[in-house]
Image (tube, grey):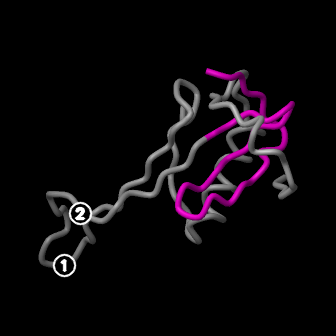
Amino acid sequence: MLGCQTVEPDYDKPAHIIDVDDASRSALQQAVNAAIGTNVTLADNALTDTSLLTLENRPPRTMENPNPQGRIMEIPIQFQLIKNGNDCILIDQRDRSRQVLSGTSCETE
């Protein structure tokens, strides 16, 4: 379950997820998918070692080049996990929008 709420940014502290379980993975997956408007695949250990999550686009596959090489030089999408009070909050760095990750435990770095 996701939620948006007003929080005081002065209390934001970079954090990482602890006690990872299906609920915390699902909350993170739903928040990221909603923020970028498509489904992405996240590693099971996303945001467990660091507060930053970076998503880069892959070069598109085509019939002529089914396994493209190289990188797309667009700016990657970056999220930061912070702890504010008891809440774990995912911040989309593009617009600073915030999603509370319900059912997720995190600790400050």
Secondary structure type for disc 2:
loop
Q: In this view, does 106 lie to the left or right of 38?
A: right
- In percent of the image, x 68 and y 31: which residue is there? 13
Residue 66 placed where, x, y %?
19, 68
- In percent of the image, x 30 and y 61: which residue is there? 58
Residue 44 placed where, x, y %?
56, 35
Residues 78 and 56: in front is 78
**What span is colored magenta in the figure?**
81-109
What residue does disc 2 label?
Answer: 73
Contact, mark 2 vs mark 1 (Cβ under 8 Å)? no
Q: Does the magenta stretch include residue 91?
A: yes
Count of numbered tags: 2
Could you tell me which quadrant the C terminus lies in?
Answer: top right
> Are there few (<14), some (14-19), or many (20+) residues within 10 Å of tag 1?
few
- The amino acid on which the numbered mark 1 sits, given as a three-letter code, is Met
- In percent of the image, x 83 and y 37: which residue is there? 87
Residue 30 placed where, x, y %?
69, 56
Front of the two marks 2 and 1: 2
Q: Please, is residue 50 above or below residue 25 in the view?
A: above
Quarter of image, res 106: top right
Quarter of image, res 10: top right
Q: Is the magenta stretch mostly helix, strand or loop?
A: strand
Residue 76 placed where, x, y %?
38, 57
- The amino acid on which the numbered mark 2 sits, given as a three-letter code, is Met
Q: Does the magenta stretch include residue 30?
A: no
- In percent of the image, x 34 and y 61: which residue is there? 75
What residue does disc 1 label?
Answer: 63
Residue at the far bottom in the pictured view? 63
Q: Please, is residue 100 above or below residue 97 in the view?
A: above
Q: Please, is residue 87 above or below residue 74 in the view?
A: above
